[in-house]
Amino acid sequence: MKEKIAGSEWPVMEVLWEAPNLLASDVIEALGDVDWSDKTVKTLLNRLVKKGLIDYTKEGKSYRYFPLVERAACVKEESKAFVEKVFGGSGAAFLTNMIKNERLSHEEIDELRKLLDEKDGQ
């Protein structure tokens, strides 16, 4: 990944991953739950362009924005950085903490068991 996505930039990226090629006004509308001014959203879009994480095409006086990085790659990088920072790079310590401190449904527990069994078979 080129540069890290700042916390305030994640909601904008989520909108563009969900529906690429949006006008700035569409991004603003999609972020309706977030209490940001139009100017703030446009600033975040410009920041993401400068970081090389999104780009745009010009249509008359408007711009259509689209992501240049995949969500999965960004989540992977962010997860690795978090585990490194908070758990000294130990995935096991992270998983142990999550399992002890989070409520997990039976389906989530089954999925974790399946993933661990697959990992154990490698």
Image (cartoon, grey):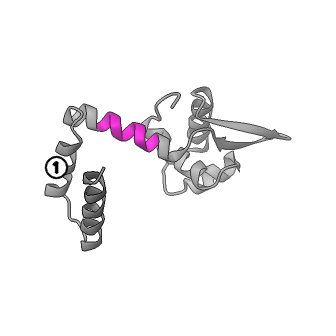
Q: In which quarter of the image is residue 55?
A: top right
**Can residue 118 be found in the magenta stretch?**
no
**Can residue 75 be found in the magenta stretch?**
yes
Q: Quadrant of residue 117?
A: bottom left
Residue 49 appears anywhere in the view = yes
The residue shown at (39%, 38%) is 78
Residue 36 appears anywhere in the view = no
Where residue 54 appears, as percent x and y from the top left, is: 62, 37
Q: Pick out the residue farthest to the right.
A: 60
Where residue 71 appears, as percent x and y from the top left, is: 51, 46
Q: Name the residue under label 1.
A: 97
The residue shown at (16%, 49%) is 97
So how many labels did they put on this image? 1
Q: Quadrant of residue 6?
A: top left
Judge left or right: residue 110 versus residue 42: left
**Main secondary-structure element of the magenta-colored stretch:** helix
Where residue 50 appears, as percent x and y from the top left, is: 61, 26
The residue shown at (16%, 50%) is 96
Say which of 96 and 46 sits in front: 96
Q: Pick out the residue farthest to the left.
A: 100
Point out the stretch of residues depicted in magenta.
74-82
Judge left or right: residue 32 versus residue 26: left
Say which of 75 and 60 sits in front: 75
